Amino acid sequence: MTVEEGELLGLIGPNGSGKTTLLNIVSGYYKADAGTIAYQGRAILGHAPHKLARIGIGRSFQITKIFKRLTVIENMLVAGLSDGKAARAEAQDRAEGLLRDLKLDRLRDERASSLSGGQGKLLEFARIMMLSPKIVLLDEPFGGVHPELKRFMHDRIRKWNAAGTTIILISHDMGSIFDLCERVVTLSYGDIICDGTPEETRNSPAVLDAYLGDHHGSA
Amino acid sequence: MSMVAILEQALNGFIVSAFYALAALGLAIIFGVLRVVNFAHGELYMLGGYAYFLAVSALGMPPIFGILFATVALAAMGALVEWLLIRPVYDGRADRPEEYSIMITFALSILLLNLANSLFGPWPRRPEPLFRGGVELGELIVSGDRLAAAGVAVVLIALLLCGLRYTWAGRAVRAVSQNREAAAIFGVSVTQVGMLAFALGAALAGTAGALMGPVFNVVPAMGIIPVIKAYVIVVLGGLGSIPGAIIGALILGQVESFGTILIPDPSRALAYKDAYGLVLLVAILLLRPQGLLGTKERRA
Amino acid sequence: MSLTMLRVTGSGLLLAGFLILPFVLGDYWIYTVTIGFYYAILAASWALLVGYVGRISFAQTAMAGLGGYVSALSVQYIGLPPVFGLLLGVMIAAAIGFAIGWLTLQLHGAYLGLTTIAFAEILRITATAEYNLTEGSRGLQVVPLLENGTRVEYYFLFLMITLACLALMTWLLQSRVGLFFQSIREDEDGAASLGVNVTLWKIMAFAISSAFAGLAGGLQAHFVQLITPSMMSLQEMGLVLAMAVVGGFHNVIFAALGGVGLQVLLEALRELGEWRLVVFGLLTLLILRAAPNGIFGIIFDALAKRLLTKGRDE
C-alpha cells in the first residue's frame, strides 16, 4: 500500500480488521512480525514513536491523550519543544496561532481537564499540528463529536490537506470518509480488499461482504 | 551434605512456606479484588502478633483462642481501613487512584509501626506458644511450636481455598477478581466484596502474625521482613493469583532455606538471608513482571 | 501578574526568615533546622520524581544513605577531601539512580514501588552486612565537612546548598524538561506521539532525583559525623514521604518546606516521644485523603484566590 504525498486517504474496515493496529505499527507503538514501512524513501519500521513524531509523522488516539493537569498552552508547548531545538518564544507564537485557528485561544491558560470532549479533540489536533507534520494519522477523530463541531473539523482537515499535509483518516463514520477522501482503502482481517475512489468502494462486493459477513456469497 | 541435613533444610523451608503462604494469600486476595498492593500488610501481620500477645499474656486466654482473637480483631481492623482509606481508590474520589493507593497504604504502614512502638514499646515480647518441646520425625528433630503453627497455617489455607470455591462470598470474591464490571452486572456489590476482601486479607495477615509471634518475637518491626517476602511470593506467583501465591511461598521457603548454606561465613550468611528474596523479587519484576502464573498486566 | 508577585513575596519573606533565624535561635535549634535542610533537599528530590514525573520510588533515603556511605568511605579509605567525597557520592548515587531508572522502564505503579523497596532494602542490608567496611549497624564515624565548623557556619552552608538545589530544580522544572516530565506523568504514549523521548527522560528523572538525594545524604553524614544503615530504612523513607506529602509533593518548594517544618516539629514535640510519629502518620493520611496538594499548597491556593478576587473587585 502506497500513500502519495498530499493525499487525503480514508482507511476503513469492520471492527478487528487491523486499522488501528496498522496505525500503531506505522507510528512505532507496535512491533511488526514482518514487512517494511518506507517514509520518504527511508525504512522506518521499528523506529521509536518519538523519533517518528520528530520526522513529521503525527498521530491522534481513539481516546484522546491530552495532558489533563497541564494547561492548554503547555499541552501545545510539549509538542513544540520536544525536539530540543525550537526556541520557546517561537513555539509559543506558533502555538497561539494554531489555538486561534481552532478557536481554543480563549482557553489558553485553562487546565486541559476542564475541556469538553470536543475541545479535547481539537486540542489534540492542535498539538499534532505543532509538530508541523508531513503526514497525519487520525484515529476515529469524530467519535462522540457534535455535528457542528464535526463540520468544523472537516473544514480544518481539508484546509491542512490543501496546505500540503498528507492525511490518513480512520473512521467508522462513512459519511465523513466519503465526504472528505478522494481515495479509500478497505481492510479486512489485515488484508486490503478494496482500494479505490469512494464510488468504487461503495459499489465493491468485497467491501459489502466484509461488513455484512460473506455468508451470502459462499453458498 | 548428608541426607538428613538436606531433609532438615527442606522441612524447615516447608514450615516457613506455610507462614509465608498465609500472609501472601491475604495480599493476593486484596490485590485480586481491589487492584491495590497493600503496603501496610506487614503491619497488619504485626498487629496480629500483638493481638495474640494481649489475648494470651494479658487476658490469659488459651493460645488457640488467642489466634482466633487475632483473626477477628484484624478482620474488623481491615474492614475499617477499607472503609476509611481504600474506598476512594475505586469510587472515583481519588484523582490518581493508583498513586493514592500506594502512598496511603505506605503511610498507613509507617503509622501503624509507630503506633505499636508508642503503645507497646520497642521491646520484644514472647507470648506462650501453641505447643512446646521438640517433635521427632525419624532422625529429624523439629521444634514443636513451629510445627504446630505450620500445621494450623496449612489447615487454614485449606479452609480458605474451600471457602473461596464453595461459599457464595468466596465465589463473589473470585468473580470480582476476574471481572469487576461483569460481577457488578450480575448483582455482586463490588463495594461489599471490596470490604470483605480487605477484611479477609487483614485477617489472614493477622493470623499469620499470631502464629509467628510466639515462634520468633512480637516486636513493632516484626512485619517488615515477612511482608517483603509476601511481596516476593505474590510477584513470583503473579499478583492476585491464589495458586500462584501458594507455589511462590513453596519456592521462596526452599530458596531461603538452602540459600543460607551457600555463603560459608555464617554471620554474613545470616545478615544476607533476607536479601535473597529481594534479589529474587527484582529479578522477577524485571524479567517476568506478570509472574509465573499471572496474566500479562504490568500496569498494576 | 499578581501570582508572580505572590511567589516573589512569599519566597522573599521565607528567605529573610531563614537568614534571620540563626541570630534569634539557640545552638540546639540551629542544629535542628540544619538537619531540617537535609530533609528539605531529600523531600524536594522525592517530589521532583513522584510529583512531576509520576514515577514512584521508595528508594530515596537509600540513595541518600548511598551518597553518605560513598562519601564517608572514600574519605576514610582513599583519603579524599570531604568535598570530593561528596561529589563522588553524588556521582555514584546518580549512576545507581540511572541504572534503576533504566531497569524499571517497563514498570509502573505498585510494581515500581515494590522494585524500589527491594533495591532500597538490598542497599541497607548490604551496608549492615559488610561490617568490615561499614561497621554495620554500630555506625561509621565520619570526618566533619568543615574543620572546627561552628553550628552557625554549618547552618549557612546548608542553607546555601539547599537554596542552590531548589533553584536548580525550579530552573529545570520551568524549562522544557519540566514540561516533558509532566507530560510523561500524564500520559506516556501521548508524550511520545508528540516527540518527547520518554525513555530518556524517565531514566534521567531517576538519575537527577537520586543525585540530589545522594548530595543530601553526604552532607548529613559529614555534618552529624556518623552514618548508620538506619538512615536507609523504610521508616526514614516514611518520614520523608510524610514531609513531602504534608508540605505538598506537587511542588518542590512546598515539599522542602514540609521537610524543614516536620523536622522542627519533631524536635518541638519531643516530650510526646514516639507519639510524634503517630501524629505525623495521621496527618499524612488525612492530607492524602482530603487535601492532596499539601498544607503549603492549600495556603498558596487560598492566598492566590484572595488576590485574584481582590484584583477583580478593584
Image (cartoon, rainbow, N blue to C red):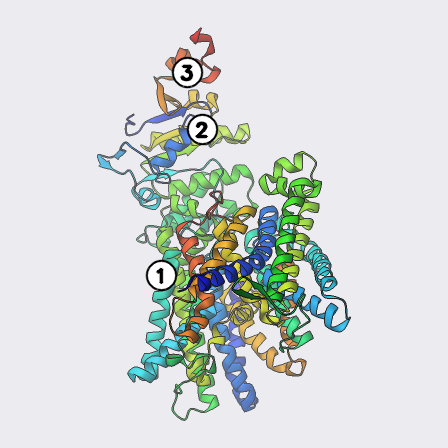
Tag shown at residue A106: none
Q: Are marks 2 and 3 in contact (CB under 8 Å)?
A: no
Q: Mark 3 Cα within 10 Å, few/some/many (few <14, many 20+)?
A: many
At mark 2, the secondary structure is helix
Comparing marks 1 and 3, which lies closer to the viewer? 1
Horizontally, residue C284 falls left or right of residue A198, namely right
Query: Which amino acid lies under the numbered mark 3 shown in the image of this protein?
Result: Val
The front one of A43 and B193 is B193
Q: Mark 2 Cα within 10 Å, few/some/many (few <14, many 20+)?
A: some
The front one of A66 and C310 is A66
Subunit of label 1: C
> From mark 2 to mark 3, how far is it between C-alphas?
24 Å
Please state, as top left, top right, bottom left or bottom right, where the N terminus of chain A lies in the image.
top left
- How many marks the image carries: the answer is 3
Query: Which amino acid lies under the numbered mark 2 shown in the image of this protein?
Result: His
| Residue A207 sits in quarter | top left
Tag shown at residue A207: 3
Comparing marks 2 and 3, which lies closer to the viewer? 3
Question: Which residue sits furthest top?
Answer: A219
Query: Which amino acid lies under the numbered mark 1 shown in the image of this protein?
Result: Ala
Horizontally, residue C245 falls left or right of residue A197, namely right
Spot occupied by residue B298 in the image (x, y as percentages of width and height)? 47, 47
Subunit of label 3: A
At mark 3, the secondary structure is helix
Q: Which residue is mark 1?
A: C99
Subunit of label 2: A
| Residue B76 sits in quarter | bottom right
The front one of B297 and C101 is B297
Tag shown at residue A154: 2
Spot occupied by residue B220 in the image (x, y as percentages of width and height)? 62, 71
| Picture residue at 70% right of the left edge, 43% below the top | B169
| Picture residue at 55% right of the left edge, 43% below the top | A115
